Amino acid sequence: MAELKAVLFDMYGTLAGFDPPREQIQALAAEKFGLEVTTDGINAGYHVADEFMTSQNTSNPVRTMSRNEQWAFFSRFEQLVLQGDGHDVDLSLAGEIWAEVRKQEYRIALFPDVIEGLDRLREYGLIVGVVSNMNSSSKRLCDDMGLTGHVDFAVTSGETCVEKPDRRIFEAALVKAGVESGEAVLIGDQLESDICGAENAGLRPILIDRYNGHPDYEKHPRVTDMESVIALISQLRSE
C-alpha cells in the first residue's frame, strides 16, 4: 500500500455542525406549530435528509436551483427531518417550519475537537485539506470557519463548479495536495458523496459517524471523532 501523505476532510457533519445544535434549532421552530422533537429523532431525520441532499446535488445541485426550486427542495428536506422524529407533516407545513428554522440565530461552527486534531495531523508531516460542497471560495471558507493556518488548502464546489461525489472535485484536491490518489485518505460523514465519491476517485475513504447514523458500517474504516481519526491515521502510517 502506498505511503500515506495527505488527509482530506469533508466540512459539514465532519469538521463542523450547527451552533446551537440542530436539535435545539429544530425544537424552537417546531414548537411554534405544536410539535415536540427529540435529539435522537432529529439526528435520525437529518441522517435521511442529508442523504437526500447528496442525491439532489448529484443530479441538480441545490446551489444552481431557482429560488422556487430551493424552497421546494428544503420543504422536502425539512419533511424528512421531522419524519425521523415520527412527525408526518405535509410539504406545505414542512416549508413553514423550515422558514422558522431559517429565522433562528445559528451558525455553522467547528466541532470542539477539530483544531487540535488538524494541528496534530500536520505535526506528523501530513498534508491536510478540506473538500467541501459549500458554495464558497476556498479562502472564504477557511477564513470564515477559522481553518486558516490549520489546513494546507481547501477545495469547494463554489470554485470547481462540481459537487461530491463527482470525481473531479477530488482530483482537484489531489492536485493541490501534490499527491497520488492512493496516497490520500478522505474523511467524511456521507456514504454517497464522501465515501463512494472518494473510493471512485481512488482515494482511501474513512467514514466519520459523529451522530451514530451507521453503527454497523464495515466496508471502510469508521471513526466517531477526531481522537479516533488520529488513532486510525497513526495506525495507517505504521503499516
Image (spheres, helix red, strand yellow):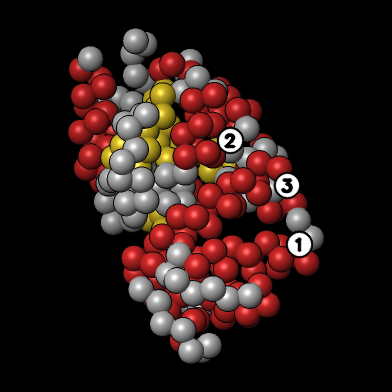
Left or right, residue 174 beside residue 13: right
**Do the numbered discs 3 and 2 sit on residues whose CB atoms are within 8 Å?**
no
Q: Quick check: can you spot residue 95?
A: no
Say left or right for 65 vs 187.
right
At label 2, the amino acid type is: Pro
Q: Where in the figure is residue 14, as x and y percent of width and height? A: 40, 47
Question: How would you rate the neighbour count of disc 3 (Cα within 10 Å): few for under 14, some for 14-19, many for 20 or more?
Answer: few
Would you name the residue on which mark 3 appears? 60
For disc 1, the marked residue is: 69
Please tell me which of labels 3 and 1 falls first in the chain: 3
Name the image quarter holding the C terminus.
Answer: top left
In the image, what residue type sits under mark 1? Glu
Q: Kindly identify the residue that appears in the image at 50 percent across and 81 percent down.
A: 29
Q: Is residue 103 above or below residue 109?
A: below
Badge 2 density bin: few <14, some 14–19, many ≥20, Cα 10 Å: many
Whole-percent x and y of residue 234?
Answer: 21, 27
Residue 175 quadrant: top right
Please tell me whether mark 1 sits on a helix, a strand or a loop. Answer: helix
Could you tell which of marks 3 and 2 lies nearer the N-terminus? Answer: 3
Mark 2 or mark 1: name the one nearer the start of the chain.
1
**Mark 3–mark 1 contact, CB under 8 Å?**
yes
Relative to residue 104, is residue 5 drawn left or right? left
Q: Quadrant of residue 38?
A: bottom left
Residue at figure coordinates x 41%, y 60% from the top left = 44
Amino acid type at mark 3: Asn
- Residue tagged 2: 165
